Amino acid sequence: MVRNERDTDPRTDEGRRIGIVAEDLHIERVIARRREKALVRSGYRDLLIRILVLAAAVWLILTYGFLITQCSGQEMYPSIKDGDLCIIFRQATFRLMKQQYAAGDIVAYRVDGKRHFGRVVAIGGDTVQMDDTGSILVNGVTEGEDILYPTYGRGDDLVTLNIVQKNTLYVLGDYRTNTQDSRDFGPIPMESVEGKVISILRRRGL
């Protein structure tokens, strides 16, 4: 019986083993590359989801938590000038946060659909008195804010006394001699107040 040299040659067996090992290594490399690609795709997908969630959160905050608007007019001059950008915090949006304002706060509010800016002078329960000297007294105390312009009543009624109703704000513009405010509209209902101005971006700085 004649034996095939390929069946008995050790070098042939070694070559087969090397070939099998090489093939196994190739398969392992292919699997590793596929796993790596899958991990990269998963990472990109997770990153995209996070970006979308963050963008949605920012959109919700800017839409319902804050308001960015341009001031028109000089009713709050010189504190806010025509064309300045105002960032307004909508306190009413956050249900867990009690809506509170204090004297000196600058607020945005609406009357007959038009947005106005003004400074809170008094809140519900306070008394506001103006006299012919241009001074304003809140609960018998002279207003603490540094206002450049005198504060008079409207028309012939230069001496006035107002009791601010509950859930309203008595709001005046800083340009006291050339503005419409609570002297014209009366105390502003809380539901008409859009929010508190927390930052002002000057037009000349844009």
Image (spheres, rainbow, N blue to C red):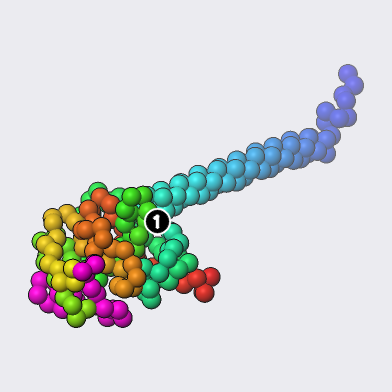
- In the image, 170 versus 43, the foreground residue is 170
For the point 40% across and 69% down, the residue is 74
User: Where's residue 128, x and y in %?
Assistant: 14, 68
User: Where's residue 139, x and y in %?
Assistant: 10, 71
- In the image, 86 versus 122, the foreground residue is 122
Q: Looking at the image, which residue sits at the far front? A: 156
**In the image, is 163 to the left or to the right of 134?**
left
User: Is residue 21 covered in magenta?
Assistant: no
**In the image, is 7 to the left or to the right of 50?**
right
Q: Is residue 67 above or below residue 171?
A: above
User: Where's residue 180, x and y in %?
Assistant: 31, 63
Chief SS of the magenta region: loop
Looking at the rendered image, the quarter that the N terminus falls into is top right
Q: Is residue 38 visible?
A: yes
Q: Is residue 50 visible?
A: no
User: Where's residue 165, x and y in %?
Assistant: 13, 56
Quadrant in the picture for residue 23:
top right
Q: Is residue 18 above or below residue 191?
A: above
What range is drawn magenta here? 135-156
How busy is the neighbourhood of tag 1: few (under 14 within 10 Å), some, or many (20 plus)?
some
- Which residue was labeled with disc 1? 67
Check disc 1 and report its element: helix, strand or loop: strand
User: Is residue 141 covered in magenta?
Assistant: yes
